[in-house]
Amino acid sequence: MSTMIGHFVGGQALAEQQTGERMSVVNPADGSTLGEVRLDAIEAADQAVQAAADAFESWANTPVGERVQCLFRYKQILEDRFEELAALIVREHGKTMAEARGDVRRGIDCIEYACCAPVLMMGNTLPQIAVSSSFSRTEDEGGVGIDSTSERVPLGVCVGITPFNFPIMVPMWMWPMAVACGNTFVLKPSEKVPLSALREIELTAEAGFPPGVVNVVTGGAPVVNHLITHRDVRAVSFVGSTKVARHIYATACAAGKRAQCMGGAKNYMVIMPDANREAVIDGVLGSAFGTTGQRCLAGSVAAPVGEAADWFVPAIVEAARKIKVARGDDPGAVMGPVIDRASCERVKNYIQIGLEEGAELVLDGRDFQVPQGGNFVGPSIFDHVSPHMRICREEIFGPVLSIVRAASLDDAIASLNSTDYGNMGVIFTQSGYAARKFKTQARAGMIGINVGVPAPMAVFPFAGWKNSFFGDLHANGEDALRFFTEHKILVSRWL
Ligand code: NAD
């Protein structure tokens, strides 16, 4: 019998029964079972929302300066536990230790930004915005002055639903800013990587967050669908695939919730003939194969323009062939496994689809195996891909790079803009003119210029356009503050 993974509710661990619909959490590097999650943990979800609702009033009334003291202490706890958390990510997600450290570090960035809440939450005041004519007895008979002020106030119980690919960081796009603003929070992490998120939230108790302010409930789709329509939930923040993002957005909005839903991606990287070759190979390699291609900012299409293909294609194939694929805790590993068997099969299936569509497979990672088993697939590259092919339009979410040879920059931008997604676009060039044209015309929310993974730091908003995002306010940056608060406008006069 494997261990049941529980929840963290009201400041303490909440155990789960070995009953209902369940799923094993598996180390993708060797197939070993780390525990089991109950997918339909509805009772725990109700308890978590209740704990968050009970904690709300007192937390919202705690001065913001005191609320962020908990975050300052929490940041130090993360620094002290940095290696422990990174090792946990490696164990349940499979990414390399260096990538796992990046996951924790970028999470800490979000904590630091949320510590700015006392400044960010300040409102606006405009005195003497009007004069009341009906009370003209004072102010030298000219009327009573009216002042107006806007304040930012918390919403109530907010819910976060997160994907498997950044087990520590993505939850931190949500709950730190939400609670800094005075909300209380229920996190439902991916059922594939619940252990990192559980540890992340358990540590909030050590930092002195009052019970119920931050809760985590593990589970699957039944728990999500229960939370996003729950009467006591005010806002839903989601990150995951486009299909689910669209469903969550429609359902949560129809239930009267505020929602922001980040979805999937198909990201282009345009390579101009004048680009710095070393920067291109380094940037494209990291973008296409970093985190085994399982990033919403993975560059999965490379579009060399004109003669750039002559040097780019052989160089990227040679560099990708040298990538050391191994389990994430191998100190030499550059690329780890994909998350599960189903992902492994999906990636291999897309490689077959690419072959059937007529693309040229110049690097085949399908037969890659490491001695201890696990869900490994090696770096794979298709050349002579057409923009209409499925391997160029659909998110594969694995280490497969499609090369679309473009005749001109206009041609490359047109291909990029023809995809249904709009998360990111990248250009490598030494020409300011080309870079400016690209950033102006590419229809994507995040743009990189000579940067392969243009992930915004936490002070800037993070999200894409088109089918990569449903909602109005993005994650992080000022958008996060606006998402997790609402305006209250005061109009006052004193007689
Ligand atoms: P996923 O959509 O399968 O799961 C995400 C969450 O939704 C999980 O917590 C899961 O339990 C829940 N869920 C899954 N199916 C559901 C359903 N039918 N009803 C209700 N809830 C459901 O995503 P994933 O495979 O964990 O993550 C990979 C995806 O996330 C990729 O598409 C990637 O591009 C995307 N992603 C996007 C961003 C971004 O900022 N745009 C960031 C990271 C990941």
Image (cartoon, rainbow, N blue to C red):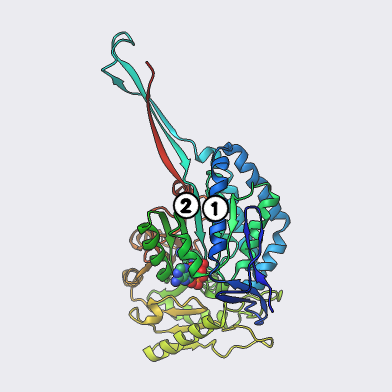
In the image, residue 120 above or below residue 176: above
Label of residue 50 in the image: 1
- Residue 276 appears in the rendering: no
In the depicted view, which residue is nearer to us: 130 or 209?
Answer: 209
Where residue 175 sits: x, y (%)?
55, 53
In the image, residue 265 above or below residue 215: below
User: Residue at (38%, 57%) from the top-left corner?
Assistant: 255
Where residue 360 sits: x, y (%)?
43, 88
Task: Give the residue at the far left of this rendering.
Answer: 133
- Secondary structure of the residue carrying tag 1 is helix
CB within 8 Å, label 1 to label 2 = yes
In the depicted view, which residue is nearer to us: 491 or 8?
Answer: 8
N-term mark: 1 or 2? 1
| Alpha carbons under labels 1 and 2: distance apart | 8 Å
Decide: few, some or many residues near mark 1? Use Cα within 10 Å; few <14, some 14-19, many ≥20.
Answer: some
User: Residue at (66%, 50%) from the top-left corner?
Assistant: 74
User: Residue at (57%, 40%) from the top-left corner?
Assistant: 58
Label of residue 455 in the image: none
Left or right of residue 407, residue 486 in this image: right
Name the residue that disc number 2 marks: 232
Quadrant hosting residue 198: bottom right
Which amino acid type is marked by label 1?
Gln
Label 1 lies in ligand 1 vicinity (Cβ under 8 Å): no
Which amino acid type is marked by label 2?
Asp
Left or right of residue 73, residue 457 in this image: left
Where residue 239 sits: x, y (%)?
48, 63
Quadrant hosting residue 187: bottom right
Left or right of residue 303, residue 14 in this image: right
Where residue 325 sits: x, y (%)?
63, 80
